[in-house]
Image: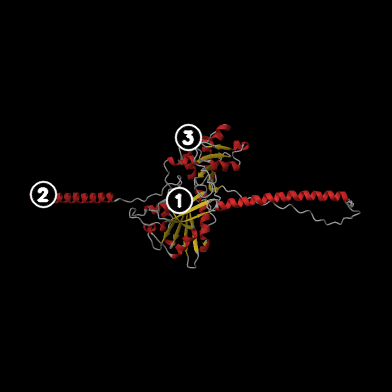
Amino acid sequence: DTKHYIRYFITDDDVIICVIDRRYIGEYPSVSVIIRDQFGRYTWDTSLTYLPLNSPEDPPLPEEITTSVLVQGTPFKFQTRKTLSGDDLSNVLGFFDKKNVEEANAKKFTVQQVQGESEYLKEHSYFLDKDISVTKPAASDPFIGSCKVNQSRMFLSQLGFLSLENRDKLYPLGFSPSLFNLLRQLDQQPERTCIRVGVVYIGSQQLEDEWFGNESGTLDYQEFLATLGWGIDITKHKGFTGTLDVTGNITGRVAPYWANNSTEIMFQVCTLMKNNPTYPDNTHKRKQSLHGQCIVVWVEDFSAFQPQQIWKRLRHSALIITITPTESGLYRIHLFTKLPDVKTSPLVDGMVLRKQILGDMIRATAANAFETFDNLEHVKPCQPRLEAIRKIYNSCKQVDNLEPFYTQQFTEIPADAVGPLQLLPAKRAARTDSNIPEPVPLPRRSDEEEETTKREKRRKKKKSRRKAEEESEGIKKTQTSE
C-alpha cells in the first residue's frame, strides 16, 4: 500500500514536510521531499550517494625565512669511532659465518616450498577451470521488512531532525481524512496574487450584438495580444487559469498568461474562444471577458463606442481600458470607471503610447485595479495559506513522548489508517473569486416565449375579427328590421 512509504511532519509550527520513499527508483536509494509553507509548495528528489575518499591534503609548507640569522658556532661536535682490535674482528667474522648458515637454510626451505606448490598447481591445472572471479554481493532489499521508510528516516537523521536536541522541533502528523482534506484545501490556495483581465475586440461599424461573436481581429490587434503574455495551453497549465474551462471545450485551449514571483495574470480573450452553437448569443464568451476587475477593449472606431454598453452588463466595479489605433502608428488610451475618485496608474486617460510598451503598462494598471476594486483589505495570498497550515497544526499534530516518537520511525503505520489515495480525488477546477458577481444577462426572449406571444397575437386577431363580424351582422339585422 502506498501509505506505508509516506510520512508527514510539521516543523517551526508553519512548515509541513512530506517524505516519500521511492521504491526501486534509480540506482541509488531515493527520497522525494515535499515542503509546504505559507509561500507555496516545493518538491525535491534526493538520492543517497557516498562521496569518494579523497587523498589527505599536503601539510602546509613552513613559512619562508626572510630575515638573516647569525651563526656563532656549530650545533654539535664531530667524534670518530675507535679502530677495531683483532679480537673484535674475529668475533665479527664468526657472527657473519653463523648468519650465512641460517640464511642458506632459509633459502633451501623456501625453494622446497616453491617446488611443492608448483607441483601441486600442475596436478590441478593451475585451477584454470575454476571460477575465481570476484562478484559484488547483492544488496539487501530495504523494503522487505514491515517498515518502508528506511531511506526517509536516514534522510531526516542526516538533516538533524531526529537528534535528541531537536526533538521539540519536529512533530509527526497523524494519517486521517481530516489531514488530507486540509492539505487539499491548502494546495488550492494561491501562493501569488491572481488577477483576471478580460479582452474584447470591437471592429469598425460593428453593432453591440456582434462584439462577442468575433473570432479574430486585425493584424495589429493580434500583435498586441502577443505583448500581453505567453500563450499557454489551458489543459496542461498548472498555474492560475482564471474562470476559463480547464478542459478547453468551451472557452478554448489557448490564452495569454503572465507571472512573476508575486503575481499571476490570466487574460481571458474573447476572440480566442470559439463560438458555440449551444450559446447563440455568445453568453459563454461575454461571461468570461467581463468577469474581472479590469477589462481591455480594443476599439477600431472610438466614436461609435459608449462605456454604458458595458456598464449595463456588470454588477461589480471595474476599470475599462480602451485602446484605439491612430493613423500615426501609435495607440490612444482611454480609461472609464464608475467611481469618480479612483486614481489609476501608470496608465492615464488620454495617453498615446507605442505598441512595445502596451503590455507592460496594461499589466501594471490591471494589478493596481485589482488592489482598488477587489482586494480592499489588501490581504496577501500568504495569509490564507498560513491560516490553513495552523488548522493542520492544531488538529493533526501528534504530541508523543520520546519512546513513541522513535518507535514510529521504525514501524509501519496502523492498518486502519487512511492513505492519501484512498480519498476521492479532487477535480481540477479554476480558482475563482466569490466576491465578484456574474455579469448581468441582457433580457432576451426564448423560443417558447416568442411562440406564446405569436399565439396570443393570433388569438387576439381572431377575437377582433369575430367581434367585427358580429357587429356587421348586427348592423345588417337592424337595417332589415327597419
Of residues 415 and 274, the one drawn nearer to the viewer in this rendering: 415
Instruction: Please say if 355 is above or below 109.
Output: below
Q: Amino acid at mark 1?
A: Gly
* Residue that mark 2 sits on: 478
Which quarter of the figure is the N terminus placed in?
Answer: top left
Of residues 234 and 333, the one drawn nearer to the viewer in this rendering: 234
Instruction: Please say if 263 is above or below 158.
Output: below
Q: Amino acid at mark 3?
A: Pro
Residue 16 seen in the figure: no
Is the Cβ of the residue at disc 3 closer than 8 Å to that at disc 2?
A: no
- Label 3 or label 2, whichever lies nearer to me, is 3
- Label 1 or label 2, whichever lies nearer to me, is 1
* Residue that mark 1 sits on: 242
Of residues 306 and 81, the one drawn nearer to the viewer in this rendering: 81
Crowding at mark 2 (Cα within 10 Å: few <14, some 14-19, many 20+): few
Crowding at mark 3 (Cα within 10 Å: few <14, some 14-19, many 20+): few
User: Label 1 to label 2, Cα distance in Å?
Assistant: 77 Å
Crowding at mark 1 (Cα within 10 Å: few <14, some 14-19, many 20+): many
**Residue 414 bears which disc, if any?**
3
